Image: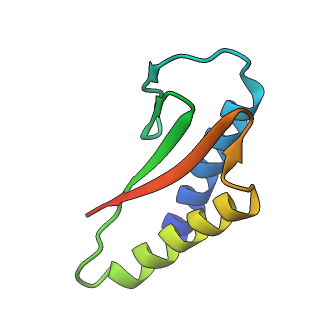
Amino acid sequence: MLRKASALLIALAVVGTACSSDKKSDTTTPAGGTTASGDTLIIATDLPLQGANADASKDTNNAIELLLEQAGGKAGAFNVAIKAYD
């Protein structure tokens, strides 16, 4: 449960930060596992997708995807996507 809340807060912080910025750059690497390339922000997760914690990790990634879907996949002028790593 704590992981879910933490991942969701990170995603919200990234989306909120992107929405509040008027500046664009070709490549940025802020804390929180995001990069910007052109007009697309990538939110990266590094949660275990195998083993005992796989279900919780899948739920966390699904929660982030739902948040992005509800935001229309956008944060200000940026498109936002999630990339899950194991």
Residue 35 image position (x, y, % from top left): 44, 33
Q: Where is residue 10 in the image (x, y as percent from the top left)?
A: 57, 48
Please report the residue visible at 67 percent of the width from the left and 32 percent of the height from the top: 18
| Protein image colouring | rainbow
Q: Residue at x 49, y 65 (%)?
A: 3
Vertical comparison of 51 with 30: above or below? below
Q: In which quarter of the image is residue 78?
A: top right
Q: Quadrant of residue 33?
A: top left
Q: Position of residue 69 (x, y in %)?
A: 68, 63
Hey, which residue is sitting farthest front in the picture?
Answer: 38
Q: Where is residue 46 in the image (x, y as percent from the top left)?
A: 33, 56
In the displayed structure, 19 sits above or below 66; it is above
Picture quarter with the C terminus: bottom left
The residue located at (66%, 53%) in the rendering is: 73
Which part of the image, by quadrant, shows the N terminus? Answer: bottom right
Q: Which of 34 and 25 is in front in this view?
A: 25
Q: Which of 37/5 is in front?
A: 37
Question: Horizontally, is 34 left or right of 18 in the view?
Answer: left
Q: Residue at x 28, y 85 (%)?
A: 52
Q: In this view, does 18 lie to the left or right of 84?
A: right
- Work out whether 11 lies above or below 47: above
Q: In this view, does 37 lie to the left or right of 51?
A: right
Q: Which of 43 and 12 is in front in this view?
A: 43
**Side of 34 relative to 80 (left or right):** left
Q: How many marks overall?
A: 0
Comparing 73 with 35, the one in front is 73
